[in-house]
Image: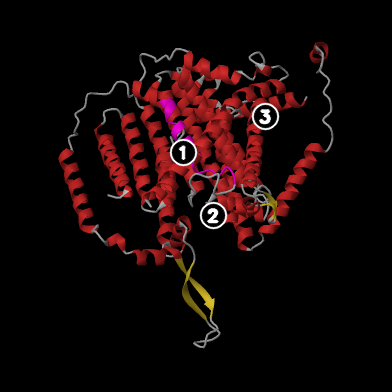
Amino acid sequence: MTQALLMRYLLWPLVKFLGAFIVVQAIVAAMNWVERRLLGLIQARLGPNRVGWHGLLQIVADPIKFLLKEDIVPSSSEKVAYFLGPMLPLIPTFMVYCLIPFGPPPMFIAARVNVALLLVLALTSTGVYGIILGGWASNNKYSLMGGLRSAAQMVSYEVPFGLSIVGVLMICGSLDLVRIVDYQANNAWNLFPQIVAFFIFFVSMNAENNRTPFDLPEAESELVAGYHTEYSAMKFAFFMLAEYSAMIVNSCLVTLLFLGGWTMAIDGKGLTTQQLVSMGVLGGIIGLAIFLTKMMFFMFVYIWFRATFPRFRFDQLMDLGWKWMIPLALGNIVVTGVFVLIGQERLMYWIGLATLGAIGFHIFRKPVPAVKAKTAHEVAHAS
Amino acid sequence: MTPAFAVFLIVGTIAVASSILVISMRNPVHSALFLLLTFLCVAVLFVMKGAEFVGAVQVLVYAGGIMVLFLFVVMLINVRHLPDEKVLSNFWKGGFAVGLGVFILFVAVVRPGVYHDEQLDKSRLTSVKERIWTESHKNPGTYTYRRVHRTNANSEAVGMALYTDYLVPFEVASLFLLVAMIGAIVIGKRELSATEEETAQQFILERVETEKEVKEAMSA
């Protein structure tokens, strides 16, 4: 009896967690290469292509370098906090992997909690402690500024991040990630009725992870390297590890909340959870593949954003968060509430679809005219 | 000893120990870190009691929001050159008296068994009064109220309690918080002198001008 309980509540979840951990860490390691190659592609240069085939061994070379470099501790730093700084953000990020269903349940989820979404939000919000602590403990003005900026940014964008989810919750009526996904399989992706929430969620997600265009905590033109200026070797690697792991967590969340997770179904027709579970192991693998594909798409969009947009100024960042995102998110909640109250959720899908169509039409209306570069002579005599 | 009790002992000990360390640490940042540890341990205790929602909210609100602001304050004061202060402040006698009074109050109010009335808690939290159309022989064709079982989920039960039985206290509390927030903003806002106001206005005008120029340059 005790053994069965131990298997069910300790050993089996641990094995699942380790599986998720290994897969996610492999993706993090691969992202190191993928991101630099993609940035190179977008910016019309090559990126790392020397170590191994197309630079693929860079994935191995970088960790070796991180491990072998000297671990420098500034003599005037606060030793304990300096040591804790890179560790703290890793713990909540890894804990979140227990709660995220990577495929159809019960195979691909370590711990199914009925307030999973809230717990994920709570855990990811504690990730900023490491950054603040590291920045403060370095005893360096640039590091401290980076830490403070990070704190201000996290506090500001946590609000629209949380509020944008409320609309999804109102439609699905649950905080359980599995039930949210099932609802979407039986109706349609939340992307359509909650297109505004999706937009807000995605932008705040970028801000939460300190990614360009919101990477002010580590703006190299102002703060050297921000909060990790004084960190070297594996401690620096831990900061990067935490950032990329958090990116993956957020990509998983947006997939689960807005794109139907591991299912591929509309109106209960197609690959729903029941369908996948009835297919056994094969169904599990298909579900996992669908989930990972959707998640990797968002990882790609992260990099795409980084290559496309210039960095915000700090006051612009605050303006966007407080004056645009939060009122928009509140408005979205009110509108969703009205539709749910009159029982016309279906209408929202069509409105969302029409909005998406209009955006698509606007973008692809006509080909962008090729801009002929002005010569120096023309610029000089322009006006 | 059940495993749950063992976990309770460990987590509870950490919670109490770290909360003592919060007040005995010299460095405010270290105090803040132990406060975070205390909150996390209390959240674990909530989860163990079956109140996952409260546990999650505990982490989200306290550990997430308030602690970040707290660290803000701590970092803006100079912690590198701490004044040599006594461990106990001058008011320790009064503080001790108040602490003891509150403790006695808790002991008097919280008796074992008060929170073990499972039936009372569950029925109030998981059901709701609904207005229904009766078709029975007793008063046919009128509206009556009856308790309807609604949910077993934690978050839904809390929401049901907050928005039905405790709606007025909930709304009053939120109104108080709003008033407090507005008050804090009013107090925190500094009155600008005449010259300062002029400079600020000029600064804004200049910025608008520059932005216009940039836009024109970009469209050209």
Mark closer to the observer (1, 3):
1
Crowding at label 2, few (<14), some or many (≥20) Cα neighbours within 10 Å? many
Q: What residue is pinned by disc 3?
A: A304
**Label 2, label 3: how far apart the Cα atoms are:** 32 Å
Q: Mark 2 belongs to which subunit?
A: A
Crowding at label 1, few (<14), some or many (≥20) Cα neighbours within 10 Å? some
Quadrant in which residue B74 is drawn = top left
Q: Are marks 1 and 2 in contact (CB under 8 Å)?
A: no
Q: What residue is pinned by disc 1?
A: A95
Q: Is residue A266 above or below residue A54?
A: below
Q: Mark 3 belongs to which subunit?
A: A
Q: What residue is pinned by disc 2?
A: A174
Residue plotted at (33% across, 37% down): B35
Mark closer to the observer (1, 2):
1
Q: Is residue B34 above or below residue A378?
A: below
The magenta stretch is: A85-103
Element class at badge 2: loop
Element class at badge 3: helix
Q: Amino acid at mark 3?
A: Trp
Q: Amino acid at mark 2?
A: Ser
Q: Are marks 2 and 3 in contact (CB under 8 Å)?
A: no
Q: Amino acid at mark 1?
A: Met
The answer to whether dots 2 and 3 both sit on one chain is yes
Quadrant in which residue B82 is drawn = top left
The answer to whether dots 1 and 3 both sit on one chain is yes
Crowding at label 3, few (<14), some or many (≥20) Cα neighbours within 10 Å? some
Taking the magenta stretch, the answer to whether it contains residue A315 is no
Q: How is the image coloured?
A: secondary structure
Q: Is residue B192 among the parts visible in the rendering? A: no
Say left or right for A179 vs A37: left
Which quarter of the image is occupied by the C terminus of chain B?
A: top right
Say left or right for B53 vs A276: left
